[in-house]
Image (cartoon, rainbow, N blue to C red):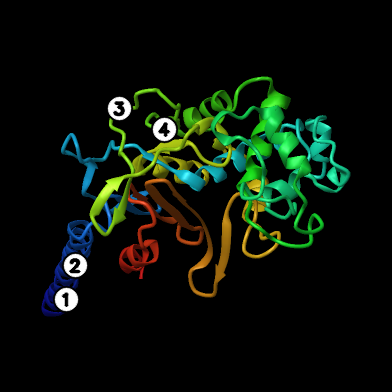
Amino acid sequence: MKRKTFFLGLLISHCFVYKIYSQNRLVGEVDKALTNLCDSGAFFGSVLISKAGKIIYSKNVGIANIEANAHVTNTSKFELASLSKPFTALLVLQLVDKGILKLNAKVSDYIPEFTRTDSGEITVHHLLSHTSGLQDFVGINCPFANWTEKEFIEALQKTPVHFKAGSQFEYASSTYILLRFIIEHVTGVSYETNLKEHIFKPAGMTNSGIIHNQEILRERAMGYVKTEAGLRNAVPIANHDIFLGAASIFSTASDLLLFDQALYTDKLVTSETLKKMFTVVLPPYGYGWFIEDDSTKGKIVSHGGDIFGYTTLMQRRLKDKSVIIILGNIQSIDRSRILTLLNKFLL
């Protein structure tokens, strides 16, 4: 009996040591791959992987500010670009939970100035799911550098729709700007205040906020573009106020993990409303998230962003409560390549 117990203990010990060895080898392999990408100017940024709230891998590579020789750290702040959209969608759904907004209400019910002849067909539901038919910024004749809400709505009303509301999916950031207007109109306070009070504070996100045009943001990861001549400063957005609702949020990898974890609780919204958020309206989108159903991994919800100098991605697997976060300060990085590397930790 003692002999069997001894060999069983030895086997368990061997398996434990082998598991640690394999994990360390994988960490070394991914570390090296990310360092190589950094050295070639293909990626600067932060990555993080968590499963059931426990961080299983994190890495910072590259430079946050080349001119100051400041390296990327855990507290480096990145522009999220379109990864801001899940936050806007969540604010809208919180207002739906409170009975302040209705998903099937017309946009014109909340923005009376939105009077285009087809406005009665376009609802909050259509804006959230990118099924409104309204065009993206391209084609909208509006002076983006110094626009006003009035000018934007007037320009949007003159721009032809691409299809009848609800009939197709077409990604359009302009619709999330309309959602921001709706949030501000019905609450009577700014989008930024809503974001801080109803998402950042409940989730404990102390290193996240709104980017303001001329405001100093300490520990900011500056944006770069890769050219034949090497890395260059990205041309900054002329006016961040333009993109509020669709972009212009900054955050860190650790803060986004807090956001991920809060979505598994009732801190932000009811579980029933979260189901709506993560249900496909028209493939591949729900309310603020791209959605995929994998036969093995279960439901995967994700959103990325790509804007002047920044590339981001947050991929959440709801079945095993895992998340992969990629925040880069080089524009148009190969996210799929990095995602393939990081997915090795979740196989």
Residue at x-position 35% and y-position 68%: 340
- Disc 2 marks a residue whose amino acid type is Glu
Asked if disc 1 and disc 2 are in contact, CB closer than 8 Å, the reply is no
Residue 29: mark in rendering: 2
Question: What's the residue type where badge 4 is placed?
Answer: Ser
Of marks 1 and 2, which one's residue comes earlier in the chain? Answer: 1
Query: Can the viewer see residue 104?
Result: yes
Q: Earlier in the sequence, mark 1 or mark 3?
A: 1
Eye-nearest disc, 3 or 4: 3
Q: Residue at x 70, y 62 (%)?
A: 282
Q: CA distance from mark 4 to mark 1?
A: 47 Å
Q: Is residue 142 left or right of residue 124?
A: left
Earlier sequence position, callout 2 versus callout 4 = 2
Residue occupied by mark 4:
208
Give me the residue at 55% from left, 37% from top. 243
Dot 3 surroundings within 10 Å: few (below 14), some, or many (20 or more)? few
The residue tagged 3 is 218
Distance (Cα) linking label 2 and label 3 = 32 Å
Instruction: In the rendered view, tell whether residue 100 sits above or below residue 331.
Output: above
Q: Alpha-carbon distance for marks 3 and 4?
A: 12 Å
- Point out which mark residue 194 bears: none
Kindly identify which residue carries mark 1: 11
Q: Give the spatial CA distance, label 1 vs label 3.
A: 52 Å
Residue 110 placement, left or right of 193 = right
